[in-house]
Image (tube, rainbow, N blue to C red):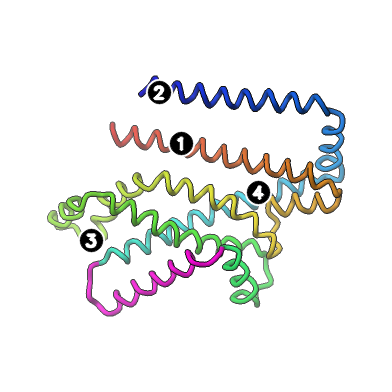
Amino acid sequence: MVKKLNKDRLVTYSLIFLVGIIGIILFFIDKDQILESLQSNFVKGNNFVELFKGLGNTILITLVAFLCGVFIGTILCLIDGINSQNLCIILLKKICKIYVSIFRGTPTMVQLLILYFVLFAFYKGNPLFVAILAFGLNSGAYVSEIIRGGIEAVPVGQMEAGRSLGLSYFKTMRKIVFPQALRNSFPSLGNELITLLKETSIVGFVGAVDLTLAFRKIANATYDYKTVYLVMGVVYFFLVFLIAAILKRIERRVLQHAKG
């Protein structure tokens, strides 16, 4: 296992080194023009200030919406798992299924536009709040399915053992089932976080300043769309790469702790 891991790292580092060498070669081929483009687009006019603001908003929307999604998804799973013929519970479960179907069955942009221009047409504050709400509701629908899959991967005997010890349904879920389900769902939850980060690029349609909108403003001002959009792609790639690396490290530690 250790040898395989070392080989994987060796291949990864080799590819990164190769890409870096190619990038350096391309840079020095047309160094003057590249430096001039970067300076005119990102240094002059303090454009980097707008970029840092957009980056901060992108990270804020992603993290807060993800936490909201995990909370909503957890509640939905708890409700879905209740085994009761009570009319209120049946109605509540049906509402939860409709919610999941709607948010999984429509594009995120459509949800954002409806929420901002229809449901929150009266709202005159910062559109960032509406963007966080829209992405949180959207993420909740997907997270509920992710966690549900994690719960189904936990042996049924775990729930039965908890109930036989006199624990209630919610206590059994909280103390026994959910910790295992979250561990099973961790890779998919990480993918949902990365997907959220990339999907935030549409919040500019409701006026919220994110990373994509900040780059678009620079491109519209300088008309150098090629350089600006290439840099934007690189920034998003490194953000995703960084998050993926952090999640991988956390996942490895969680698995080691579980085995230990």
Front one among 4 and 239: 4
Give the quadrant of the C terminus: top left
Q: Residues within 10 Å of mark 2 (few under 14, many from 20)?
A: few
Identity of the amino acid at label 2? Lys
Query: Which residue in the protein does label 3 denote?
Result: 169
Looking at the image, tell me whether mark 4 or mark 3 is earlier in sequence order.
4
Horizontal relation, residue 211 to residue 225: left or right? left
Identity of the amino acid at label 1? Lys
Horizontal relation, residue 58 to residue 73: left or right? right
Query: Which residue in the protein does label 4 denote?
Result: 56
Query: Which residue in the protein does label 1 denote?
Result: 248
Q: Residues within 10 Å of mark 4 (few under 14, many from 20)?
A: some
Query: Which residue in the protein does label 2 denote?
Result: 4
Q: Residue at x 87, y 29 (%)?
A: 32
Is residue 139 positioned above or below 124 on the image? above
Q: Residues within 10 Å of mark 3 (few under 14, many from 20)?
A: some
Q: Position of residue 35 (x, y in %)?
A: 83, 32
Looking at the image, tell me whether mark 2 or mark 4 is earlier in sequence order.
2
Q: Residue at x 46, y 36 (%)?
A: 248
Q: Position of residue 102 (x, y in %)?
A: 47, 70
Q: Position of residue 247 (x, y in %)?
A: 47, 39
Front one among 40 and 59: 40
